[in-house]
Image: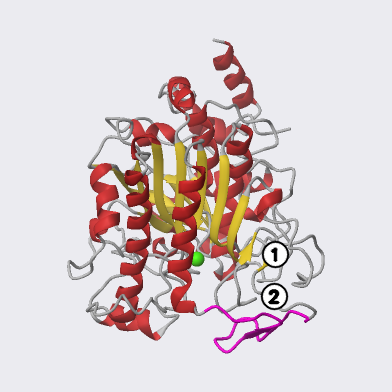
Amino acid sequence: MKSTLNRLQALKTFSTAIIGVALALPLSAQTPAVFTASDAARQKPNLIIILADDFGWGSLGCYGAPEELKTPHLDRLAREGRRFTDVYNASSVCSPSRYALMTGRYYWRTERKDGRVLGFAAPLHIETNRLTLASLCKAQGYRTGAFGKWHLGLQAGPDRADWNKPLTPGPREIGFDYFFGLAANPWNGPHTFIENDSLLGRIPGQEVTVTGGHRPDATTSGILKQYETQYIMETLTDRVTDWIEENGSEPFFVYYAPTATHTPIDPNPRFTGSPFGKYGDFIEELDWSVGQILAQLDRLKLADNTLVIFTSDDGAALRESKYSIAATEAGFALNGPFRGGKHSEWEGGFRVPFLVRWPGKVPAGTVSDQVFCLTDMLASVASVLDVPLPKGSAEDSFDAWRFFTEEKPGQPLPYVIMQAFAGATYAIRMGDWKLIERASPRQNELYNLKEDVAEAKNVIAANADRAAQMQRILSEARDRTYTRPGAGK
Ligand SMILES: [Ca+2]
């Protein structure tokens, strides 16, 4: 009863529009942890989140990719777990969606209102006293490791990173015990791996300087040897599987952010011959990498007590490389039936594959169309671990954990808010409906995604009241400092 009262009190502080949405649901649906979270907490499941890069909703077999594309390990996750069809990122580009996943807070609540990615040498964008997925797990006694593309900034601002100094604060200051990966994208530089706060392979006494930043011909001086991009995925995979072996006797959290399938589309030469060219080869390498992790869990007999999530930070970049263009022209719809891709305000930008496996807890071989956002992972993991979220944290994170385990679809979450890179355009999804906010309300667009997944027919004229309500909820969420009930300080 006490928690119900607290919940009501929290709801009362909400705006009338949001109360309208919340109270439209039975109060029981507003109470977290329908699943007996304390049982799970006693078990302390290991947690692995694999966040692929620019990997589209339609780019794996279990989401309808052409059968000539081989993704057996990802398909295995779907077969042994639950496949979600309506999961979103808070952004259609890298840094903002990664920020939202890690902190449970929308990126546009930070000083970055423009929806753009961070520069590769940007300072750490997450405050070191902010609750993150990593610090939440670490506080529960977990070993925590981050691998792969970081792209959330390194060192303290306001200047650009100085690669000659320790890269701190960084992942280890926001809750990770260990980091092995890249500052941002492979072409960005520095063109060597970072382990914890250090660049690998420095030449003693020489300055480290990155020249060229974002170009394929960018270089880094002061290191013994630049990494070869075609071996990055293999190196990262080895590090993840080794770390699991070294740390698997304790509860652990792995955040693995593969560089596939972001540009450069440069698969290991062992992966060749896909009818969809190098793009298909790169997907098959990503699938292999996931398979290596699953095999390691099997070998160490950890699979039954490990919650594995596979998803992506945004949709495929359809026009960014000749390889994605060639794959598309060969009849492979990288983002499935959806309009647009990375950067855009369309479903192809925001909507991503999402697979979850936890044997015995998540019903195997099931599909769910519950709508939620990667922003919701922090509250959902807190629910699994039975940890209350403090005020002033996880400001936009709703507990979606029940969606992983429910036998029949229960009450939905109220909404998902998204912001596109292009023009910092906002969108909101509620139920079957999606409103895209334009510069003038008269130009807003409304789509019924159940009837029109391709967002081809703007039906705002016939649904003006619904659109106005959604606009009001979006505006109020933006004006507040949080949307999670109880998150206010
Ligand atoms: Ca991305």
Instruction: Give the x, y percent position of residue 190.
Output: 65, 76
The residue that disc 1 covers is 198
| Residue located beneath label 2 in the image | 202
Q: Is residue 60 magenta?
A: no
**Where, quadrant-wise, is the N terminus in this rendering?**
top right
Question: What amino acid is at disc 1?
Answer: Ser
In the picture shown, does residue 434 fall above or below 346?
Answer: above
Residue 327 visible in the snapshot: yes
Report the front residue among 13 and 255.
Answer: 255
Query: Which picture quadrant has residue 7?
Result: top right
Q: Is residue 369 above or below residue 24?
A: below
Q: Main secondary structure of the magenta part?
A: loop
Q: Are marks 2 and 1 in contact (CB under 8 Å)?
A: yes
Q: Is residue 373 visible?
A: no
Q: Nearer the viewer, residue 311 or 317?
A: 311
Q: Which residues are magenta?
A: 206-227
